[in-house]
Amino acid sequence: MQPTIDDIMLKGWTLRLAHLIWGGLTGLAIIMMVGIIPISFQQNQQISAQALQALQNWGFTPMSYAIYLAVIDIVKNFFFLLIGVGLFIYKPRDRSTVIVSLALVFINVPNTDELKPVIRAFPILIWFSLLVDLVSTSLLIGLYYILPNGRFVPSWSSWGLALCGSALALDLTYYGFWGNHFLTSSGILLLILAGFGSGLMSQLYRYFYVSTPLERQQTKWFILGLVSSIVFLTVAFIPSSILPNLQGVSLEEVFTVHPLYNLYIRTVGNLGLLMIPITIATSVLRYRLWEVNMLLHRAIIYVTVTILLGLGYGATVLFFQQLFYLVSGHNSPLTVALSTLLLAILFNPIYKHIQQWLNRWIYRRQYKALAIFETFSDTLQNRLDLAQLTTEVVEVVYKMLEPAQTSLWLVAEKHNPQKQLLPKDDPFTLYLQNGSKTIDLAKIALSAPSPVLDNLKNLEVRTIVPLISQAELVGLIALTPFYEEQNYTLDERRLLNELATKVAPAIRLAQLVQEQQNQTRARERLDQEMRVAQQTQQTFLPKTPPTLLGWRMAAYYQPARAVGGDFYDFIALPDGCLGLVIGDVTDKGVPAAMVMVAARVLLNALAPQKATPSEVLMSVNQLLCPTIPKKMFVTCFYAILQPKTGHLQYANAGHDAPYLRHHGQIIELEAQGFPLGLFPETTYPTYELDLAEGDALLFYSDGLIEAHNSAREMFGFARLEALLLEEKSNLLERLLTEQRKFTGAEWEQEDDVTIVTVERQ
């Protein structure tokens, strides 16, 4: 269970007591650190003649040597004190911060060995010095148990610190009474290491099972400080293991006999120790921490390489020394030269192998993500199905980074959260057009309200990856944190950006393929519908002209599109009469065909009931006017033929006047009347005539006379009249042949063509 604010905040008497203890111990630490300065300064000037000669060779005097050591110690102590006090001032009520602050202040307090000159003068101070040692050591070890939230996790881990502190207190008490340690130096070291080890186990348990994402980041910074310190200290003590004149020399002798090496150790070592307060302050004071993984990674690699190369170097020197001794019977300085040369040759290969191994071990998650990304990228170009591609992108992102939730949104005309569509005109969509990198949703501030942004925030989305192809936004990938509140690392963001650069063009290509497929399916569906409509319309037209004794009738119909607005009909009427119909609906295509069907149905229904063409057209007109679409109307010529006598009655509703060929003359059957569907009160006068033997009637639509040839000349009335005068047999075939000759083979029909011929033999 995560601690609450009340669990980690001091209040009441505990707050006052903690501040009192902190103030007392901090004041004591300052007094002791200031008081030890003259003692250390005097001790640093007590060097051997050999050390004095070495200092003089480098331009140092005992005074300048002591001043330098005092200055770097003062700087180190001041830095620890400054950061410790600063943490306390910044968070005086936070239990963890108060303890960390006190540990940083107390970590550099002089120990018993450093206070020996004072203790010899005032023996009673031995107990005070030992108590200070116990407190400072316990605070230092205790940091491993309580960081970053000031609680022991798991709770029983407090016994580890208690046992370690008790054993240390027992040993220091024994030292106070009898002047030597109850534990050997190795035992004390093992005790301290056991305390640190138990604390490290507590940190690992806390990190993997209990800590929040922020606390995990704080732990990483704390570990970075420790690892960095180890790196500096390792570098500081490497010369003592590889330089012949320093091998086997104790630290006490280093300080007095080898002052130059002492300067090196103290400088590098203090720099390493400074990493601890810097990283701790960073983890405590900053809520949004910098990316620490790369720094920690480099530190671990350098420590491992340094240790392995140091061990390898020592083993190589030992090997060559033994080899030389077996061959020549004595040691040679060439062994060191050969070992150094071998190490220089093998350094890069060893470093690369260690780095690769540590990369795969420490960053298993990142390597797994990279492997998934590379595999997916290699096969991305083969994915052209949009639905499959978007599904696979979401799956790949989930496998790579393991977010709690991830989704892919595509740009569309309208907002549809259920289908994860982004409207083009949404302010958030417009904002994303200008960016191509991973974006934190919390950092976006828009001047206008955005339903998309609000919806993403409601879904707890924190990270957005725009998908941009050829400067056009095609969509975005939305991710929640991969666990709790943890943000994605810089490497993970770079991987997301690389994924976006590959996915965006693939999605755009898949969209184009889908659009083409949709258009193809739409065309196929439309073609199928047109074929059905054409077949349906054909069923409304006469299959063959009627056969009447003494008459020859023919008809031709060719729509400009699959279906058209022209129509004709032969209607059987009572008393053996025949109704002749030709009509043309304005416009073309399906709308015209629907009106045509309605007009034909009405004509077939009303013609047998009405005595004259006038009555038929008036009735049809009255029924069409309320239902016909706006800006549409029907031209129609209707005639009633009595086959036995040749008597013809006719009326016209705005259609092209038919031609009559009579005794070598061409006569237009003129009749007045508005088209059907315009004015419900329109009347249509009936006209009459008698057809003699050899007479011919030609009914046509304007598609015939308005046909154009390649020179954009119209077929026209004059050409039609001339053909009609030829009085050759089969008038319809003659007209069609001449029209094809006129328009040519590549003629693109502009309007429906309908022709009906009636000839009396």
Image (cartoon, rainbow, N blue to C red):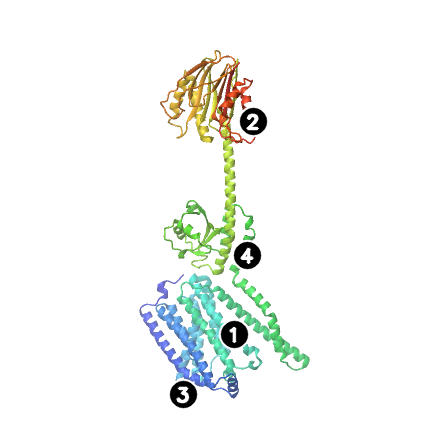
First in sequence: mark 4 vs mark 3: 3
What amino acid type should be assigned to the residue bearing mark 3?
Ala
Mark earlier in primary sequence (3, 2): 3
Percent across and percent down for residue 349 are 59, 67
Q: From the image, tell me which residue sits under label 4.
A: 371
x and y percent of residue 36 in the render?
41, 82
Q: Residue at x 47, y 60 (%)?
A: 490
- The Cα atoms of the two marked residues, 3 and 1, are separated by 37 Å
Q: Which mark is residue 234?
A: 1
Above/below status of 47 relative to 5: below
Instruction: Say if mark 1 contacts mark 2, CB within 8 Å.
Output: no
The answer to which quarter of the image holds residue 17 is bottom left
Upstream in sequence: badge 4 or badge 1: 1
Tell me which label, 2 or 4, sits earlier in the chain: 4
Whole-percent x, y for residue 165 in the image: 43, 74
SS class, disc 1:
helix
Mark yes or no: residue 147 visible. Answer: no
Type of amino acid under label 1: Thr
Q: Nearer the viewer, residue 71 or 122?
A: 71
Labels 3 and 1: the sequence-earlier one: 3
How many other residues sit within 10 Å of disc 3, few (<14), some (14-19) or many (≥20)?
A: few
Tell me the crowding category of disc 1: few under 14, some 14 to 19, or many 20 or more residues within 10 angstroms, Cα based: some
Q: Residue at x 51, y 59 (%)?
A: 366
Q: Is residue 170 visible?
A: yes
Quadrant showing the N terminus: bottom left
Q: Any mark on residue 121, and which?
A: 3
**Residue denoted by label 2:** 741
